[in-house]
Image (tube, helix red, strand yellow):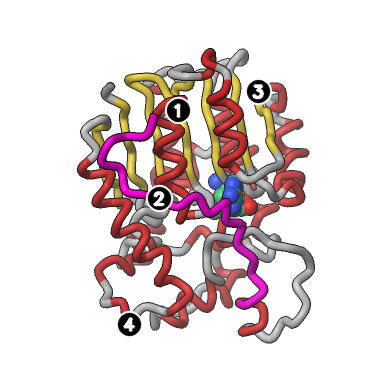
Amino acid sequence: MAYVGAPNFAATNAIYTKQSLRRINGISQPKKLLFSPLPNYKMLRMTMNLQSKASDKDEGSPWDDKGLLQSEELYQYVLETSVYPREPEFLKEIRTITANHPEFYMGAQPDSGQLIAMLLNLINAKRTIEIGVFTGYSVLLTALTIPDDGKIIAIDPDRQSYELGLPVIQKAGVEHKIDFKDSPALPVLDKLLEDNENKDSFDFAFVDADKTNYGNYHERLMQLVKVGGVIVYDNTLWYGTLVIPEEKVDELMRTERKYFLELNRFLAADTRIQISQVTVGDGMTICRRLF
Ligand SMILES: C[S@@+](CC[C@H](N)C(=O)[O-])C[C@H]1O[C@@H](n2cnc3c(N)ncnc32)[C@H](O)[C@@H]1O
């Protein structure tokens, strides 16, 4: 049942194509339909008048981007001191594979991953849902963290990208924990909800997909995740654009900017959850279901 007072989040079933971005970038024929909720990384940096890092890929991986931090050096310090030394080799391998993907910037950042692993351990998560898999960094991270009989429902319509990371997942010996659904997420969540056994049965959900459906995912996940369980939404500070006047934000980012402004207000007012807005990566909102 929908939460009384919930805004009417239109179910868009959106799958974003990058055709327009490719046209802007002078690439006329997209290689395939790409499902990207994010504008082109390099363009994004240019439009926000930030120094492009994508062009000096050799000097650092795409994940060296400082995210919301305003100090590249501080972000490097965090990665080199606390994150990389603890990052499992299999996850490093997925990052390396992802670096050669045309949409490499969509891969999860390892410091965000470290926080997710911590949350999974703190709540002893066993059954999880992942919306937005891409090449599989966060799915592999989850699979490495939950117990051997744990299960992840991992949903993404882009099987091709998932298959890039799949050999690493297989090598890590955790493929049996992953039930990959090659589909947009809404129909999968609705199908899960048809079976009462699935209600209140998941410990954790990570949402990192089409941004303008987050409200729709929230209403469904609030029925699937148990009381005391955790839902994490990624990109909730949308590259810092939330505090930039709309007219100064590139048009490509305005829809999501507006959407996150509304979603963040909504989550803050949702008494069913305890929240923490974390400034790691592009902003993550951690929600713990209270009732
Ligand atoms: C930012 S990436 C996810 C990154 C991933 N969590 C990781 O660890 O690298 C976003 C993903 O969302 C997927 N996506 C887009 N629309 C979707 C939808 N309606 N349902 C599920 N996934 C979707 C895209 O195909 C893309 O792979």
Q: Secondary structure at mark 4?
A: helix
Question: What's the amino acid at mark 4?
Answer: Lys
Q: Label 3, on which residue?
A: 177
**Looking at the image, is mark 3 or mark 1 nearer the viewer?**
1
**Prevailing SS of the magenta stretch:** loop
Question: What's the amino acid at mark 3?
Answer: Lys
Which quarter of the rendered picture does the N terminus lie within?
top left
Give the CA distance from mark 3 to mark 2: 32 Å
Residue 107, visible in the rendered structure: no
Q: Are marks 3 and 1 in contact (CB under 8 Å)?
A: no
Q: Label 4, on which residue?
A: 248
Per the image, is 5 magenta?
Answer: yes
Which quarter of the rendered picture does the C terminus lie within?
top left
Horizontal placement of 144 versus 217: left or right?
Answer: right
**Looking at the image, is mark 4 or mark 3 nearer the viewer?**
4
The magenta segment is 1-20
Where does residue 28 sit, x and y in percent of width and height?
75, 82
Q: Label 1, on which residue?
A: 204
Q: Secondary structure at mark 3?
A: helix
